[in-house]
Amino acid sequence: MVFSSHIFLYYFLPIALLLYYISPVRWRQLVVALLSYVFYGWANPWFVVLMLFSTTVDYICGLLISGKWKLRAFASDPPAGEGQPSARQRKFALVTSIVVNLSLLGFFKYLGFAQTNLNYLLELLGRPAVDLYTVVLPVGISFYTFQSMSYSIDLYRGDAKPARDFLDFAAYVSLFPQLVAGPIVRYQDLADQLRWRSHTVDKFARGVLFFAFGMAKKVLLANPMGAVADAAFGAGHLVWYDAWVGVAAYAFQIYFDFSGYSDMAIGLGLMLGFEFKRNFDLPYLSRDITEFWRRWHISLSSWLRDYLYIPLGGNRVSPKRTYANLAIVMLLGGLWHGAQWTFVIWGAIHGSLLALERWRGKKPIYAGLPGPLPALLTFVVVLITWVFFRAETFGAATGYLGSMFGLSQPSSASALMEPLLYQPQYLIVMAACVLVHLLRLDTWDLAQEVKPSKMAWASAAILASAAILFTQSYNPFLYFRF
């Protein structure tokens, strides 16, 4: 189930809000968890079993780390500290949590990738290929395994307190507003809200603003840009300017698609009394790649920083080791997005650029240019990297880059692109995407204060989005496949 669907807008959301608010306060946690499991299991109920397994493992590991449960095998060990179990029990529980979650993610997301690469190596060696096994990728597994695993890590570090009970932890992991595509929420950020949270008219109204503007981003901006991007990337070799228009359309599609989803998730959270942190901050205004990663998918960037980059040594080690850490983190960040070499290359390019800027004192080569030029050039660099993110294969990516820089002969089909790419409605939408950035019209800022004028705009946005949903056949959520 996706937010921008009739089943969610007209059935699930009204019923969910009604059930939540008519329930006694002591039952609301249970209502949230049950609604979340219905939401997640709508397409495939078996996915709920997998999520429950991950939730149960990490809850038990949390009990072991905090000392609420003690294993006989470690009973004779000295305690790690006052009121804590032994160091061996704590490490055992932490390793179990990490191994189980990464194993789930590895099996369901990367088995096919591993099989394909193994067969490629066997072919080079003249050996017979292995049979390929198809595994269905559970929606949102990349997000909820990271969330669930971070709970165990934070408990081990002393950065979080253990969950009050299993229901609290299950509600945290399964919370439907941000379950299948983020933002990645850490337990310590919601711990107090799981125990008690306020419900006010102002908070609910802010939630409506977030949801309405997020829906408008998704339906009115991202979807039309996606149609342009799909046409361009599916056309073979293009005239250079058509190729640049196509990748710019994809840049706007992925930004407004994902930031729109995050806005809707934040809005739904507010309607239920939860407050999530900001996940996007107009990243295409960044003046360098380092700033871009402070503004893009902030919850993932901070997760990779705190649970991978800093444990590797961060920037507290030698400069060469720091550059290597940046490269490793971004390589794994690329692989997290998808089981394709194109994602790995995308991550490698960003890691190399971050290392280069670190070497230059956190500045790009063009840092000294005046006015908006650094931001413009950073956007161009990001566009080039998006080619690898969007292309299905390495060959398709290099071919598209060849078109962008006039290094390949346009195919005969490219002549048909202009009437499609430059339709008036697409040009208007692309101009609107540019204006949103230039005017700094970010949902996070717009929804901080509720005014009648904003509610009027939000009403118009949600009505227009709902009306267009009846006519749009193209309505993907890009990050569902990550």
Image (cartoon, grey):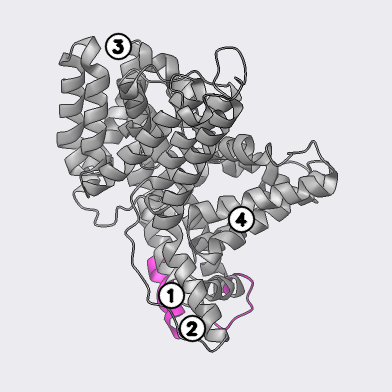
Q: Earlier in the sequence, mark 3 or mark 4?
A: 3
Which of label 3 and label 4 is nearer to you?
4
Residues in magenta, as a range: 403-422
- Local SS, label 4: helix
Q: Which residue is mark 2?
A: 411
**Residue 7's mark?**
none
Circles 1 and 2: CB atoms closer than 8 Å: yes
In the image, taking residue 41 as reference, residue 208 lies left or right, namely right
In the rendered image, residue 312, in percent from the top left (x then y), is placed at 70, 42
Amino acid at the residue labelled 2: Ser
Which of label 4 and label 1 is nearer to you?
4
Measured Cα–Cα span from mark 1 to mark 2: 8 Å
In the image, taking residue 426 as reference, residue 328 lies left or right, namely right
Which of label 2 and label 3 is nearer to you?
3
Amino acid at the residue labelled 3: Val
Q: Earlier in the sequence, mark 4 or mark 2?
A: 4
In the rendered image, residue 202, in percent from the top left (x then y), is placed at 34, 12
Residue at horizontal 37 percent and vertical 32 percent from the top: 173
Which of label 3 and label 1 is nearer to you?
3
- Local SS, label 3: helix
Amino acid at the residue labelled 1: Ala
